[in-house]
Image (cartoon, helix red, strand yellow):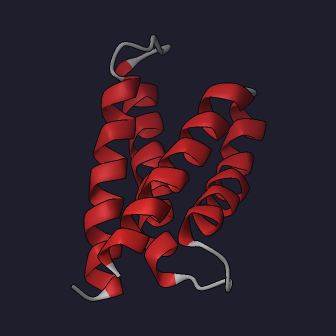
């Protein structure tokens, strides 16, 4: 499987998982919840897409953690929810990195 296709699959899967984690959260109204879920999906899709397609010369799991933390930081700053957003980003990046290594 090509890295681009692998990235699309990982991106969709990670995006869906993150949106599912957000379902129980309370928001001011339905519009804000949809916006937050859409932003979370796009954020995690891009993370899942990039990990198999970026080569930093280190193990893909390390790349995954670095990208997971770095790409999650802006959302964490805006929402002030550092631990859940950055934790999910780092954990997801780590898992996607290990799976990427297994499939290469």
Residue closest to the far front: 102
Task: Please tell me whether residue 51 is drawn above or below residue 48 in the rendered image.
Answer: below
Residue drawn at x 71%, y 38% as measured from the top left: 76
Closer to us: 59 or 92: 59
10 to the left or right of 25: left
Residue drawn at x 42%, y 16% as measured from the top left: 29
Task: Please tell me whether residue 86 is drawn above or below residue 10 in the rendered image.
Answer: above
Give the total number of marks visible in the rendering: 0
Task: Please tell me whether residue 33 is drawn above or below residue 6 in the rendered image.
Answer: above
- Report which quarter residue 24 is drawn in: top left
Closer to us: 38 or 95: 95
Residue closest to the far left: 1
Residue drawn at x 65%, y 49% as measured from the top left: 72
74 to the left or right of 9: right
92 to the left or right of 104: right
- Dividing the image into 4 quarters, which one contains the N terminus? bottom left
Q: Residue 43: where, in percent of width, then height? A: 50, 54
Q: Residue 94: where, in percent of width, then height? A: 54, 53
Q: Residue 59: where, in percent of width, then height? A: 60, 73
- Report which quarter residue 78 is drawn in: top right
Residue drawn at x 69%, y 30% as measured from the top left: 79
Closer to us: 57 or 72: 57
- Dividing the image into 4 quarters, which one contains the C terminus? bottom left
């Amino acid at each position: 499987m090509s890295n681009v296709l692998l990235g699309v699959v990982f991106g969709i899967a990670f995006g869906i998982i993150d949106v599912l984690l957000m379902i129980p959260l309370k928001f001011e109204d339905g519009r804000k919840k949809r916006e937050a879920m859409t932003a979370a999906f796009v954020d995690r899709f891009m993370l899942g897409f990039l990990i198999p397609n970026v080569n930093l010369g280190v193990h893909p799991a390390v790349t995954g953690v670095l990208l997971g933390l770095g790409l999650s930081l802006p959302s964490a700053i805006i929402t002030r929810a550092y631990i859940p957003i950055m934790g999910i980003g780092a954990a997801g990046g780590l898992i996607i990195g290990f799976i990427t290594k297994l499939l290469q």
